[in-house]
Image (cartoon, rainbow, N blue to C red):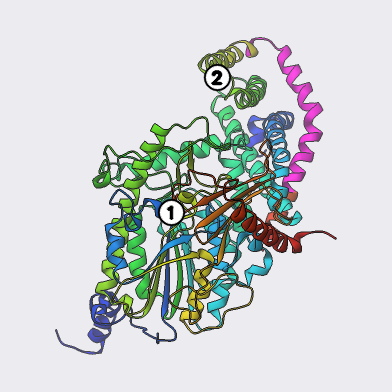
């Protein structure tokens, strides 16, 4: 049995990969699309493709770093929390953090009570940690979501790999 | 000690270390191969140094006494202009001898048209046996240097001189630096637009702050207003000046070296001894707001920023003074053309701070230019209108080389044998909202001819296309727009400017 499989089933690994990779890629790709008009101003088509390729390379790097971090935390907590509970809980937390990032980005310049917002987000995260492990239905929900988003996540990771290949070709 | 073969070889190995000591009696370095036709060329650029804030040019505060010492052996240009108002544009014009409407490095992170990979200062001097070197703290300049990298013999990474470099691209993706650096900035820097990353930019910025604090703590007392550098690098000028002194002995001669230092570009971080030296009652003239004024700025905060900028210039001057003394002591001036200039200026007026915006007022485009020829011992002052596009053709002329036809600049007085035209027009272009390969539809373009300056705004959203005209001799602060008052001059200048734009746009117009 390989090292991660000692702690995580294949299904757990897929679920964590989806919940790590999907928001990271969605955010990265949306922002990159928003930047395209400004890139067209100053870049040729091959330079824009190069810029995309670097972006996807960084996205893959971020996905790997965060996934390894989450897996490591899970292993470290394995004496106090079952793997199934950890996978469910971290799926929730990863989704919430991504949504909070979106919220902060949208409200930074317009919302007058940022301190209040930070406290509210903190309370949501604490409630998640307290409530999610107690109810087994959350496990089924996160698993169902992961199953539905898995194919899209694989496509994202495939795009990353294409990006890495383009970067390697550009550097060669 | 007995001098046998072994001991002799041991002692011989120490000779290179002693070179700086014995160099005092010889022009730089052991490999002195320069001749009157092939002197070394050293271009020293300080980023965002406005001539309007330099004491040598009549500024109220004594910001650059050491530059005045250098001026005693140089030609001082009093009406010198950059071709643009931010680093990429200004630097590309220095290095190619062309205006931005031609080289088209008009965007942040931008590069010139591919044709200029082999039409630049490096290519121009390469065929004459020069060792061509390039260095910059400013990574926007590095994007350009990488664009010309095939023509550069000795490129030095900023991280080789920096105390800390947190950039990834210049370490990992060096051969594709321009695109990689732009992508890295989008991914790791949470500016506007927001970072493309959810987590990594936070990790990156936390690590940067931590390491920056560890490294910066050692310098905190010396730099109470912050550590010199930019967001990703700690680059005290002292280290760079020491590095230049070392390189002056190491570059194979004759050399052509372009050195671009970040200070006094913001953030302004003067050394402790310069903090508060300009805390005085002096207040610059208040100027009217402009459509492009920043609502978040006010005159009081601009005056404070200007004061700290002036302190930072004084710090730059002290370090330049140290380099100057070194070059005097080591006879560098004997066989080297030394050029001192800047890529653009800095604004502290009309509720506009900094550079790179759509305006082209004097503080942001007037830059210093001093040229010291080998063995020059006296000062010359030139008041003719000159531009940074003139530096390259002047260097080629001074070294007896032919000037390629693609260069748009002219040989500067007093070096030209022909009479320098008193009615010459020079241009400044800001077009960072325009497509690189399309005619100039969204841009600010200024033209100076004689005493008059015409500024043309075109294509800006919610701002009507229009012109401003100033008499720089009678109104150097550009307070009275004469466009409708001096219609005769305005019309003639407008016709000339529009015809020039039409001519320069022609290659970019689709059939």
C-alpha gap between disc 1 and disc 2: 53 Å
Residue depth check, mark 1 versus mark 2: number of the one nearer the observer: 1
Chain label for disc 1: B
In the foreground, A36 or A116: A36
* Most frequent secondary structure within the magenta stretch: helix
Q: Residue at x 68, y 59 (%)?
A: B501
Q: Residue at x 62, y 37 (%)?
A: B193
x, y (%) of residue B147?
60, 64
The stretch of residues the image draws in magenta is: A133-161
x, y (%) of residue A116?
53, 13
Q: Residue furthest left?
A: B1
Disc 1 crowd rating (10 Å Cα; few below 14, some 14-19, many 20+) is many
Q: Which mark is residue A80?
A: 2
Disc 2 crowd rating (10 Å Cα; few below 14, some 14-19, many 20+) is few
Asked whether the residues under marks 1 and 2 belong to the same chain, the reply is no
Asked if B447 appears above or below A121 in the picture, the reply is below
x, y (%) of residue B321?
28, 61
Tell me if residue A52 can be seen.
Answer: no
Q: Residue at x 46, y 58 (%)?
A: B158
Count the labels in the image. Answer: 2
In the foreground, B286 or B239: B286
Q: Which residue is mark 1?
A: B262
Tell me if residue A129 can be seen.
Answer: yes
Occupied quadrant, residue A20: top right
Horizontal side of B123 relative to B314 (left or right) equals: right
Q: Are marks 1 and 2 in contact (CB under 8 Å)?
A: no
Horizontal side of B455 relative to B132 (left or right) equals: right
Horizontal side of B23 relative to A22 (left or right) equals: left
Helix, strand or loop at label 1? It is loop
If the image is split into quadrants, where does the N terminus of chain B sit? Answer: bottom left
Horizontal side of B124 relative to A6 (left or right) equals: left
């Amino acid at each position: 049995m390989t090292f991660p499989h000692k702690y995580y089933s294949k299904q757990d690994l897929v679920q964590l990969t989806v919940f790590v990779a999907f928001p990271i890629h969605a955010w990265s790709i949306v922002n990159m699309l928003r930047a395209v008009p400004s890139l067209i101003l100053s870049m040729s088509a091959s330079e824009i493709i190069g810029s995309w390729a670097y972006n996807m390379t960084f996205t893959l790097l971020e996905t790997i770093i965060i996934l390894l971090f989450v897996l490591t935390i899970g292993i470290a907590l394995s004496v106090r929390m079952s793997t199934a509970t950890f996978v469910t809980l971290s799926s929730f937390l990863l989704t919430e953090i991504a949504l909070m990032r979106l919220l902060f980005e949208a409200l930074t310049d317009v919302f007058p009570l940022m301190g209040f917002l930070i406290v509210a987000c903190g309370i949501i995260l604490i409630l998640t940690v307290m409530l999610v492990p107690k109810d087994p239905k959350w496990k089924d929900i996160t698993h169902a979501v992961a199953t539905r988003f898995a194919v899209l996540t694989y496509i994202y990771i495939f795009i990353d790999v294409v990006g890495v290949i383009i970067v390697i070709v550009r550097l060669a | 000690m007995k001098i046998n073969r072994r001991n002799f070889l041991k002692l011989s190995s120490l000779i290179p270390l002693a070179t700086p000591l014995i160099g005092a009696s010889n022009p730089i370095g052991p490999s002195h191969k320069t001749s009157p036709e092939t002197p070394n060329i050293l271009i020293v650029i300080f980023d965002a140094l406005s001539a309007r804030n330099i004491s040598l040019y009549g500024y109220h505060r004594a910001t650059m006494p050491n530059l005045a010492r250098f001026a005693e052996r140089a030609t001082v240009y009093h009406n010198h202009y950059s071709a643009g108002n931010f680093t990429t544009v200004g630097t590309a014009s220095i290095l190619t001898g062309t205006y931005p409407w031609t080289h088209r490095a008009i965007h942040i992170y931008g590069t010139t048209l591919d044709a200029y990979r082999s039409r630049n200062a490096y290519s121009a001097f390469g065929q004459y046996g020069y060792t061509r070197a390039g260095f910059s703290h400013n990574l926007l300049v590095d994007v350009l240097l990488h664009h010309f990298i095939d023509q550069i013999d000795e490129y030095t990474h900023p991280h080789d001189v920096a105390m800390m470099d947190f950039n990834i691209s210049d370490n990992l993706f060096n051969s594709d630096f321009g695109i990689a650096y732009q992508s890295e900035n989008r991914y790791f820097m949470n500016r506007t637009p927001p970072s493309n990353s959810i987590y990594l930019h936070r990790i990156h910025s936390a690590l940067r702050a931590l390491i920056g604090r560890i490294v910066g703590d050692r310098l905190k007392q010396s730099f109470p207003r912050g550590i010199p550098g930019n967001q990703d690098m700690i680059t005290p000028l002292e280290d760079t000046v020491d590095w230049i002194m070392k390189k002056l002995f190491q570059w194979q001669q004759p050399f052509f070296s372009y050195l671009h230092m970040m200070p006094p570009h913001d953030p302004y971080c003067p050394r402790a001894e310069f903090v508060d030296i300009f805390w005085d009652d002096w207040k610059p003239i208040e100027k009217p707001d402009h459509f492009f004024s920043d609502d978040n700025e006010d005159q009081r905060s601009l005056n404070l920023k200007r004061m700290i900028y002036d302190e930072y210039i004084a710090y730059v001057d002290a370090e330049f003074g140290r380099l100057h003394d070194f070059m005097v002591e080591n006879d560098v001036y004997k066989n080297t053309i030394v050029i001192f200039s800047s890529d653009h200026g800095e604004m502290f007026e009309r509720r506009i701070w900094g550079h790179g915006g759509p305006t082209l007022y004097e503080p942001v485009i007037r830059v210093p230019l001093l040229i010291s020829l080998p063995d020059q011992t006296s000062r010359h002052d030139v008041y003719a209108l000159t531009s940074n596009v003139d530096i390259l053709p002047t260097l080629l002329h001074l070294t007896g080389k032919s000037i390629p036809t693609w260069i748009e600049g002219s040989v500067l007085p007093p070096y030209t044998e022909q009479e320098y035209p008193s009615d010459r027009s020079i241009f400044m272009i800001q077009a960072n909202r325009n497509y690189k390969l399309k005619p100039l539809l969204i841009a600010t373009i200024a033209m100076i001819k004689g005493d008059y300056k015409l500024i043309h705004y075109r294509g800006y959203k919610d701002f009507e296309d229009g012109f401003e005209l100033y008499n720089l001799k009678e109104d150097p602060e550009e307070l009275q727009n004469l466009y409708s008052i001096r219609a005769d001059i305005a019309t003639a200048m407008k016709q000339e400017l529009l015809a020039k734009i039409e001519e320069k746009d022609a290659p970019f117009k689709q059939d």
